[in-house]
Image: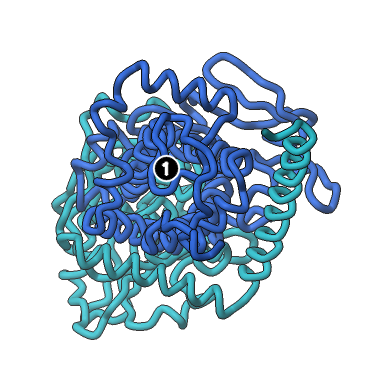
Chain colours: A blue, B cyan
């Protein structure tokens, strides 16, 4: 069997994938703790308790709620008000099981966040440079003209809806995979870095254009939060896809780089 | 083809793995957070942030300034809302008529500067954004005396490395204090503000004088400043980390992020 294994993921892709998985997990969980310090989001340059928030997570002492615009959703038990591990009621936006550290500690959360931000930013830069040089972007992520055809995209949507994935097709991504990977690698992840930098008062003095692009520090903070939410959704869908499309092969290929040979004809019509 | 049971089994596995994974990550992270060695690794990154900022940044690069139309309708009050020392309360009664700012430490000419003298000195007016470490921001117009003018008058020693601000407010028994390096102390936007939005600085915002150090977060902007001390060593003050929140909340001394 081992002799028939085909190469799927390059070493740089595999190393970055796992480093990034660790970094993003820590950044998300420490980020939620930082958010807990002021669980309100605004558009524009300024925004505080005195101003209108477009998103707010808070509690009424007995219930937790999320307010988006003029819509209020009760979220008791999870957001706004939840039970700690000690079964005591905690009036925090995100519950302890979702934050680093578990108990409210803004100083510690910021330290975790800014340390792992280096791992994340340097990792992404290194992965992008390596992928440009070793052909990963050109061979696997580049979306070819034929793939943009609505008919082609629709066929892939139908295949996904029927849970028909070609998990054993070494070395090519289908069009929905390409859209999500390109969107994450080249849009969402860089946006996290740039909106993060735009929130730093020192960086605002050094790179004023960065803060102008996002139309203000509070807008940058909102976009940072929205992108983090989109990344979380991506990771959830990604995990579901891995499990539905053959988790053993999928995880093995991201560790060893090898994948078991194809047994079926690719649903997209390409024999592999 | 997969049958349903297979998929349900996988879902349960997925859920189990996610919950188990989360618990494992959390207990692991909390344990790491308690570890002195790991904390010192994270602190290395903090030093790196400061070094990179100071390396990238033009020493005199200005924080963004805004048009009057951007001023926050209500500037959120935060931290102490009044000074609490007996000396301060006495000055509050006499509307700071006899109040003086003490400037001493590693300076050639220690001075006591009255509010009147301070206001008669050349001043700078700036509409800037106040960024709290918690995440909120508010914009106001500040008017005050550039700190560098006072340090030059007092004859700052060449051996001094930091400027410490001793304040009249306190949390319990702990007086508030803060400190900055000389790069920020001599920055053109670093002022001792005595005016806010065209009026005398109100008490809840730090009267008679508060620090504005515009390229750093709100907790560096000490209110109710009574004494300015030049030093080469921050470890000899209070908890030794250079500021109240640095000592008590373990916040970073360099608050440029």
Going 55% across and 21% down the picture, which residue do you hit? A68
| Quadrant containing the N terminus of chain B in the rendered view | top right
Mark 1: few, some, or many residues within 10 Å (few <14, many ≥20)?
Answer: some
Decide which of A93, A7 is in the foreground and name it. A7
Would you say residue B115 is visible in this rendering?
A: no
Q: Residue furthest right?
A: A87
Is residue A65 toward the left or the right of residue B104 in the image?
right
Is residue A79 toward the left or the right of residue B115 in the image?
right
Locate residue B30, reporting x and y percent.
66, 64
Q: Specify the quadrant of the image occupied by residue A91.
A: top right
Is residue A241 toward the left or the right of residue B223 in the image?
right
Decide which of A51, A191 is in the foreground and name it. A191
Query: Pointer 1: what residue?
Result: A272
Secondary structure, mark 1, is loop
Q: Chain of mark 1?
A: A
Going 28% across and 78% down the picture, which residue do you hit? B161
Q: Residue furthest top?
A: A70
Going 49% across and 52% down the picture, which residue do you hit? A24
Q: Specify the quadrant of the image occupied by residue A65.
A: top right
Locate residue B166, reporting x and y percent.
43, 66
Locate residue B16, reporting x and y percent.
76, 48
Q: Specify the quadrant of the image occupied by residue A214.
A: top left
| Quadrant containing the C terminus of chain B in the rendered view | bottom left
Decide which of B161, A89 is in the foreground and name it. A89
Is residue A188 toward the left or the right of residue A213 in the image?
right
Would you say residue A66 is visible in this rendering?
A: yes
Locate residue B48, reporting x and y percent.
34, 70
């Amino acid at each position: 069997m081992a002799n028939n294994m085909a190469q799927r993921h390059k070493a740089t892709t595999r190393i970055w994938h796992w480093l990034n998985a660790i970094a993003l997990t820590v950044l998300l969980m420490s980020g939620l703790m930082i958010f807990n310090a002021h669980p309100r989001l605004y558009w524009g340059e300024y925004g505080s308790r005195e101003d209108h928030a477009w998103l707010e997570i808070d509690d009424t002492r007995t219930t937790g709620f999320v307010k988006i615009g003029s819509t209020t959703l009760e979220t008791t038990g999870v957001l706004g008000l939840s039970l700690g591990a000690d079964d005591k009621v905690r009036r925090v936006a995100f519950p302890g099981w979702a934050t680093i550290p578990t108990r409210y500690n803004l100083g510690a959360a910021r330290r975790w966040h800014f340390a792992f931000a280096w791992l994340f930013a340097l990792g992404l830069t290194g992965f992008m440079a390596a992928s440009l040089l070793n052909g990963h972007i050109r061979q696997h992520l580049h979306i070819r003209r034929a793939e943009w055809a609505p008919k082609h995209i629709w066929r892939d949507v139908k295949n996904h809806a029927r849970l028909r994935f070609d998990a054993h097709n070494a070395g090519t991504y289908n069009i929905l995979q390409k859209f999500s990977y390109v969107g994450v690698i080249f849009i969402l992840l860089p946006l996290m870095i740039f909106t993060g930098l735009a929130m730093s008062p020192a960086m605002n003095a050094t790179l004023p254009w960065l803060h102008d692009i996002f139309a203000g520090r509070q807008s940058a903070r909102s976009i940072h939060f929205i992108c983090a939410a989109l990344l979380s959704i991506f990771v959830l869908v990604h995990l579901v896809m891995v499990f539905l499309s053959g988790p053993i092969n999928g995880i093995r290929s991201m560790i060893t780089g090898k994948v078991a040979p194809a047994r079926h004809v690719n649903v997209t019509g390409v024999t592999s | 083809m997969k049958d349903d049971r297979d998929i349900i089994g996988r879902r349960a596995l997925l859920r189990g793995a996610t919950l188990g994974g989360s618990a494992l990550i959390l207990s692991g992270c909390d344990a790491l957070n308690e570890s002195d060695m790991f904390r010192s690794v994270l602190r290395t990154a903090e030093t790196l942030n400061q070094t990179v900022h100071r390396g990238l940044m033009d020493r005199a690069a200005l924080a963004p300034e805004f048009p009057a139309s951007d001023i926050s309708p209500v500037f959120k009050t935060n931290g102490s809302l009044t000074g609490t020392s007996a000396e301060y309360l006495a000055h509050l009664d006499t509307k700071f008529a006899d109040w003086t700012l003490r400037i001493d430490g590693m300076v050639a000419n220690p001075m006591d500067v009255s509010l009147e003298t301070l206001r008669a000195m050349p001043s700078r007016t700036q509409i800037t954004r106040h960024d709290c470490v918690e995440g909120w921001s508010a914009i106001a117009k500040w008017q005050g005396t550039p700190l560098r003018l006072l340090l030059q008058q007092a004859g700052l020693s060449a051996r001094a490395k930091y400027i410490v601000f001793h304040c009249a407010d306190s949390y319990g028994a702990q007086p508030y204090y803060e400190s900055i390096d000389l790069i920020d102390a001599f920055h053109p936007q670093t002022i001792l503000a005595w005016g806010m939005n065209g009026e005398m600085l109100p008490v809840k915002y730090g009267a008679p004088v508060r620090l504005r150090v515009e390229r750093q977060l709100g907790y560096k902007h000490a209110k109710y400043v009574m004494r300015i001390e030049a030093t080469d060593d921050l470890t000899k003050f209070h908890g030794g980390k250079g500021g109240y929140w640095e000592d008590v909340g373990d916040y970073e001394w360099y608050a440029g992020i």
